[in-house]
Image: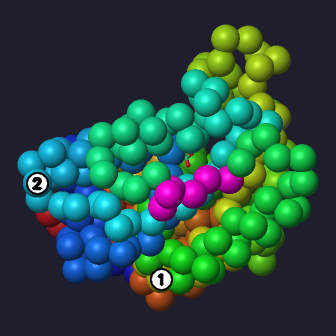
Amino acid sequence: MKLQVFENYEQVSKHAAQILIEACRRQPQLVLGLATGSTPIGMYQEMIAAYQQGKVDFSRVTTFNLDEYYPIAPEHPQSFRRFMQEQLFDHVNINPEGIHFLCGTVQDIEQECRRYEEAIEAAGGIDIQVLGIGENGHIGFNEPGTPFHLGTHKVKLTETTIQANSRFFERMEDVPRFALTMGIRTIMHSRKLLLLANGEKKAAAIRAALNGPVTEDLPASVLQLHPDVTVIVDKAAAHLLEEVPDVL
Ligand code: PGA
């Protein structure tokens, strides 16, 4: 596991974007796994800026997002699809046909999860998967206790997650109670993983994920078993680690 500590969120975002941009230059048909949440927004802004300056061409890139609420319409303002449109896809030249999402309106959930796994496989697997981390150590919507062997599946959101998500919805009853997510197995099959975290609120989860035992109680700890993980954090998220490397 490679750990890189930066001074602040801006540096984390710039560095993460640089890794994706360089990978895309080397391999224009890159398959990217993307994440929502507040953490990757700065990275997406850096990717947009690089595109606008003509420094990168995303036209042949394929993307798979980690998760989506269920049920939710793709055009709903709080859907993860809308989030990605607004934060990245509307501003760069990724071919819409190369963009993949779990569908939050399907009837047959098992079939939808199978379809997603097969689409990832048909694309040749994910080259780089971007991940955030929850304060409880979740990755994607894989909450503590999720078996490591699961592929893409439906999850019942915990009460605390529903409460946290409610800030984005007008009424409590509008907050989705479920989600579809890539499983730990899906994530671990990616060739390279990029875990981003910033801020004091993530410090305990980062310590547990990197220095603690590998356990389903702390989903991100499974990353210790992956052969190619880069963890990019700011000083605040790193400060509880047993050994903090020099700030870059
Ligand atoms: P955040 O969420 O980026 O909004 O902090 C990360 C996560 O919960 O996975």
Mark 2 crowdedness (10 Å alpha carbons): few <14, some 14-19, many ≥20: few
Q: Which residues are magenta?
A: 97-102
**Residue 217 sits in which quadrant?**
bottom right
Q: Dot 1: what SS?
A: loop
Asked if the stretch drawn in magenta spans residue 99, the answer is yes
Going by the image, does 59 lie left or right of 82? Answer: left
Above or below residue 67? Residue 214 is below
Measure the C-alpha gap from mark 2 to mark 1. Answer: 27 Å
* Amino acid type indicated by mark 2: Gly
For the C terminus, which image quadrant? bottom left
Which is nearer the N-term, disc 2 or disc 1? 2
Mark 1 CB near ligand 1 (8 Å cut) = no
Going by the image, does 226 lie left or right of 243? Answer: right
Outermost residue toward the bottom in this view: 227
- Spot occupied by residue 62 in the image (x, y as percentages of width and height): 45, 66
Tell me, yes or no, if residue 178 can be seen here: yes
Going by the image, does 115 lie left or right of 65? Answer: right
- Spot occupied by residue 123 in the image (x, y as percentages of width and height): 54, 77
Residue behind mark 1: 191
Residue behind mark 2: 54
Tell me, yes or no, if residue 208 can be seen here: no
Above or below residue 167? Residue 237 is below
Mark 1 crowdedness (10 Å alpha carbons): few <14, some 14-19, many ≥20: some
Front-most of 23 and 99? 99
* Amino acid type indicated by mark 1: Arg
